[in-house]
Image (spheres, helix red, strand yellow):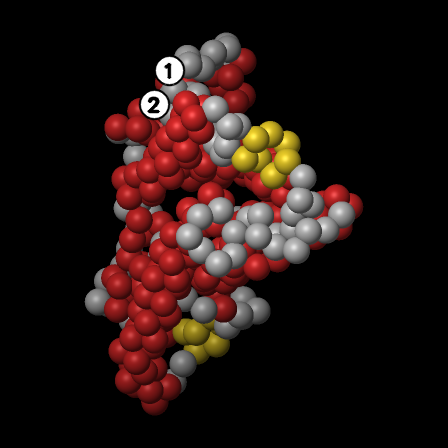
Amino acid sequence: MNRQEQESKTVCGGLSRPLGKKTMEHNRSKGMFGRIIGLTYALFNYLSAILVLGYGVFWYANLYVPVTIDSGAKVSLTTALLVNTLLMLFFAVQHTVQARPWFKKLFIKCTHKSIERSTYVLFSNIAFVLFYLFWKDTGGHIWQVENKIGVIILWSLYGAGWVLAFAAIFLKNHFHFLGIRQAFLHFQNKDFSQEPLVKFFIYSLVRHPMYLGFLMAYWATPIMSTGHFIFALEMTIYTFIGIQFEENMLIGFIGKKYRDYQAKVPMLIPFSRRIVTPKSLSPANQPE
């Protein structure tokens, strides 16, 4: 516990009050217990995320798991659009709001920064489980590929997409990405900082290889059901909107370093050169 935490306590509403000597001693005695609880909480969310993501690989593919994207009761197109869009809105709002700096600051005031990312992971897990349990299909198909070579190509792209997405996560330090690193460092009574900007290997080809991998997995299927198509389309729309939010936030955090990275590396399509206009490099568009 640092000196600032010893001298005062910031409560959820943003107010501070001084702490007496007896209170500080009591808080120190609870420190280790709190760090153990935080680490346990983060570990649970970390392991749950691995299971949830792993299940998703087979859920999207309609393989080996009891509930898949096409296995539910068939409903009308209107019902499918309504239910599925509500599920997607929950996912989008959760991902967008919890990633905003103002929300993170409020959350940290109410709890502790070491479990902020892990809580994001927890609600992401919940959003995906809701997909798995309640996603609706109509029973129709957008396309169905029967050619053996075409099927092999599509399944290969599907597998490659997941490999690319997971590789991108591991290159960025998946322990930090899934929130366990922060809680573990706090358990050791150590401070932690954000991970540095990754620009090597696949991150030198595209700025968002994880999103590219997921997009490949969403669309590469030999049998595109109506429900699957709704998922792929809505998730693609959210992905492009989410990238704009994320990159604006990164520019705010990193500044010119990230703008230089944007100018050199394309967003999602490898080997495509991003056109840099004089306007995009003008002083008015540079972060302060």
| Picture coordinates of residue 138, whole percent (x, y) | 69, 45
Cα separation, mark 2 vs mark 1, equals 6 Å
- Residue at (52%, 57%) from the top-left corner? 67
- Which of 143 and 232 lies nearest the eye of the viewer? 143
Q: Is residue 133 left or right of residue 78?
A: left
| Picture coordinates of residue 26, whole percent (x, y) | 33, 87
- Residue at (68%, 51%) from the top-left corner? 74
Amino acid type, residue under disc 1 in the picture: Phe
Say which quadrant the N terminus sits in.
bottom left
Q: Is residue 225 visible?
A: yes
Asked whether the beta carbons under mark 2 and mark 1 sit within 8 Å of each other, the answer is yes
Q: Is residue 211 visible?
A: no
Residue 205's tag is: 2
Q: Is residue 107 left or right of residue 37?
A: right
- Residue at (43%, 78%) from the top-left corner? 18
In the picture shown, does residue 274 fall above or below 123? Answer: above
Q: What secondary structure is marked by label 1?
A: loop
Amino acid type, residue under disc 2 in the picture: Leu
In the picture shown, does residue 93 fall above or below 23? Answer: above
| Picture coordinates of residue 6, whole percent (x, y) | 34, 75
| Picture coordinates of residue 167, whole percent (x, y) | 30, 39
Q: Residues within 10 Å of mark 2 (few under 14, many from 20)?
A: many
- Which of 22 and 209 lies nearest the eye of the viewer? 209
In the picture shown, does residue 48 fall above or below 288? Answer: below
Residue 271's tag is: 1
Q: What secondary structure is marked by label 2?
A: loop
